[in-house]
Image (cartoon, coloured by chain):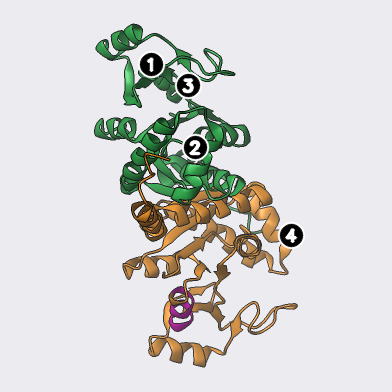
Chain colours: A green, B orange
């Protein structure tokens, strides 16, 4: 059976990547998609692990050739999800999580593709600002820009199937995991195994009255 | 905010009551509805704890007066969910689980009431038969009758939103808990807290450019 496609979006600094990295560790048969990006690797990032790092020209070629399921320009850098990678995972029956921004999620939605979309909200502007300042070597200007974009982006939560707040890391991972498990139990997904059980009941001999 | 109404059905012997008893222990703000029944209390059952035990005449009066959200005749005994009890819980913002049979679940559905319906399947006819024989002092005939009804009832899984298999107790409780958490994160439910966060971002002063 084809895997389920999950889309997780959140403003920069909400911790979406860390959340989903933990999520795929604890939920079996769930993989995080590795994006392509035109930006340079940050310290500690490895090509083919955190991202597939490619130059801008190659990225633009991939756009031109229709190789992306979605792509977006985020603060001047290009990020994209490779269509064939995605298909390979889903066709193999593995559930896949795309950690993508609001623009990318809209592209996936417009394609009419079946997906379960989850928006992660920061609990408050103060906490988001503290996280942005804490984690990055971004300039003051870059941080201000991220905050302004976050303020706009969070209004997009209404375009998603689920909304979770990253108030506490473990609780938020638990909620994300609950969404994955619940979606696997939805009638449309659980129908085939359920039918197999019904079939076993049909095939079972009617219990012998005399025994 | 009004609580969510969950309906859990399963054939007799699937372990639905034990599953939901455990579920409400581990999930906060979730209550299991206490049914009314016309049957006699079994050994170890207490009135007002396991069921509200009433006689058949009183049960029929309650039906007549429209006091039941749903009721059903299950193997000759009447079981019902009190409408005012249900409303009191939901109005207080508490999520509620009804453990009811397929007939009762159909009544709730026909009323067009918002509910999340979960069907619990036994993993196989052999295991269901073993459980029925293991747990009860039922006569051979009663066990045969329950198995025949189970064979019919399980085909009703298609009328439910979610299907889980009780192959392993803890894993099944985890799946039920995941469904409750996920439903609480659905856009329609999470909209109000999300809007409050968006409002806080709107109200936050634009970060000062000069600082």
Nearer-N-terminus badge (2/3): 3
Q: Mark 2 lies on which chain?
A: A
Say left or right for A146 vs A159: right
Task: Tell me the CA gap for discs 1 and 2.
Answer: 33 Å
Residue picked out by circle 4: B134
Q: Mark 4 lies on which chain?
A: B
Q: Decide: few, some or many residues near mark 2? Use Cα within 10 Å; few <14, some 14-19, many ≥20.
A: many
Query: What secondary structure is found at the residue carrying circle 1?
Result: helix
Residue in view at x 56 percent, y 90 percent: B55
Where B195 falls versus A92 (above or below)? Answer: below
Residue picked out by circle 1: A84
The quarter of the rendered structure image containing the C terminus of chain A is bottom right
| Residue contact between numbered discs 1 and 2, judged by CB atoms under 8 Å | no
Q: Mark 1 lies on which chain?
A: A
Query: What secondary structure is found at the residue carrying circle 2?
Result: helix
Between circles 2 and 3, the one closer to the viewer is 2
- Indicate which disc residue A34 carries: 3
Q: Main secondary structure of the magenta part?
A: helix
Where B171 falls versus A62 (above or below)? Answer: below
- Indicate which disc residue A132 carries: 2
Q: Where is residue B120 in the image (x, y as percent from the top left)?
A: 54, 54
Q: Are marks 2 and 4 on the same chain?
A: no
Between circles 1 and 2, the one closer to the viewer is 2
Say left or right for A44 vs A12: right
Task: Tell me the CA gap for discs 1 and 4.
Answer: 52 Å
Q: Decide: few, some or many residues near mark 3? Use Cα within 10 Å; few <14, some 14-19, many ≥20.
A: some
Q: Where is residue A106 in the image (x, y as percent from the top left)?
A: 29, 34
């Amino acid at each position: 059976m084809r895997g389920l496609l999950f889309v997780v979006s959140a403003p920069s600094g909400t911790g979406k990547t860390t959340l989903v990295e933990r999520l795929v560790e604890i939920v079996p048969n769930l993989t995080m998609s590795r994006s392509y990006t035109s930006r340079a690797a940050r310290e500690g990032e490895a090509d083919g692990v955190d991202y597939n790092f490619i130059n801008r020209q190659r990225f633009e070629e991939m756009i031109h050739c229709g190789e992306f399921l979605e792509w977006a320009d985020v603060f001047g850098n290009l990020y994209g999800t490779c269509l064939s990678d995605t298909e390979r995972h889903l066709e193999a029956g593995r559930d896949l999580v795309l950690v993508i921004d609001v623009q990318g999620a809209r592209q996936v939605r417009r394609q009419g593709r079946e997906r379960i979309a989850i928006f992660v909200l920061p609990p408050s502007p103060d906490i988001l600002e503290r996280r942005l300042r804490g984690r990055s070597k971004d300039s003051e200007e870059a941080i201000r820009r991220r905050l302004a974009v976050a303020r706009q982006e969070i209004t997009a939560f209404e375009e998603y199937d689920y909304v979770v707040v990253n108030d506490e890391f473990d609780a938020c991972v638990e909620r994300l995991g609950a969404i994955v498990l619940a979606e696997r139990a939805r009638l449309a997904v659980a129908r085939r195994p359920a039918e197999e059980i019904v079939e076993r009941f049909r095939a079972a001999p009617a219990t012998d009255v005399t025994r």
